[in-house]
Amino acid sequence: MKQCLTNQSLDFLWELALHNERSWFLPRKEEFERVLHRPFKELAGEVLAMMEARHPGLDFSLHVSRIYRDARRLYGRGPYQDSLWFSLQKRGGESRGPMLWFELGKEGTSHGVGFWDRTARQAEAFRQKLDKDPKAFEKLLAALPDPEKGRVWGDEYKRPKGDLGPALNPWYNRKQASWGYENYFGPSLFDPGLSGLLADSFTALLPLYRFFREAYEEALRLEQPPMQQMDRFP
């Protein structure tokens, strides 16, 4: 039987945030698996299967986060995350590059398309792609679903890199750039059809994903040492 996310899933994350210690979590590990972890992994797997069926050429791989924080980076925090997330990225990318993501936290969800860990070269490649055809990117943004519900995320530069107008500046002048929605699905979050709704939303975001991907791959090409680039040819 399909396991769905429920109000208990959010309740568990709230309780975990309040009691973020092993002595609280370990006796409740089976509850964690039942109300949160298994339903979340099942959702992620269903979304991947739908996206693979619809868009086989994109060659997605799935990464699902762990509830455990990296012990080397606790910085005084508890040992557990207070959210779970999964991402779809190009296979072989080693969890780098543009992605589609969905996150479930104690206050609800976020999902979208983005690229958080891009290098300075990768950010520059993105800006150069905007410079070449800003009208094309404006057209792409105009086609984003429910623009009034979404927003641009990412750290901004202290000194702007340029002025392409009010529509493009939020993208042009960020170290990282993502587009996402918060609590987009409302009561449907707990429906068996959530995976289909999420796959629909990801599909609508694919033009932006492809734009990110093209800029990323151009940056990778430029970042390769000259000898590596030559080795690709007979």
Image (cartoon, helix red, strand yellow):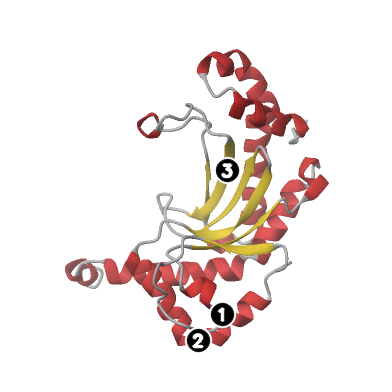
Q: Residue furthest front?
A: 158
Quarter the C terminus occupies: bottom left
> Could you tell me which residue is drawn at 60 percent across and 66 percent down?
206
> Could you tell me which residue is drawn at 82 percent across and 45 percent down?
187
Mark 2–mark 3 CB contact (< 8 Å): no
Q: CA distance from mark 1 to mark 3?
A: 28 Å
* Residue carrying label 3: 85
Q: Which mark is residue 137?
A: 1
In the foreground, 225 or 92:
225
* Residue carrying label 2: 133
Q: CA distance from mark 2 to mark 1?
A: 7 Å
Looking at the image, residue 95 lies above or below residue 190: below
Left or right side of 122 for 190: right
Three-letter amino acid code of the residue under disc 2? Asp
Left or right side of 169 for 44: right
Count of numbered circles in the view: 3
Q: Residues within 10 Å of mark 2 (few under 14, many from 20)?
A: few
Three-letter amino acid code of the residue under disc 3? Trp
> Could you tell me which residue is drawn at 70 percent across and 59 percent down?
201
x then y, percent, for residue 186: 79, 49
Quarter the N terminus occupies: top right
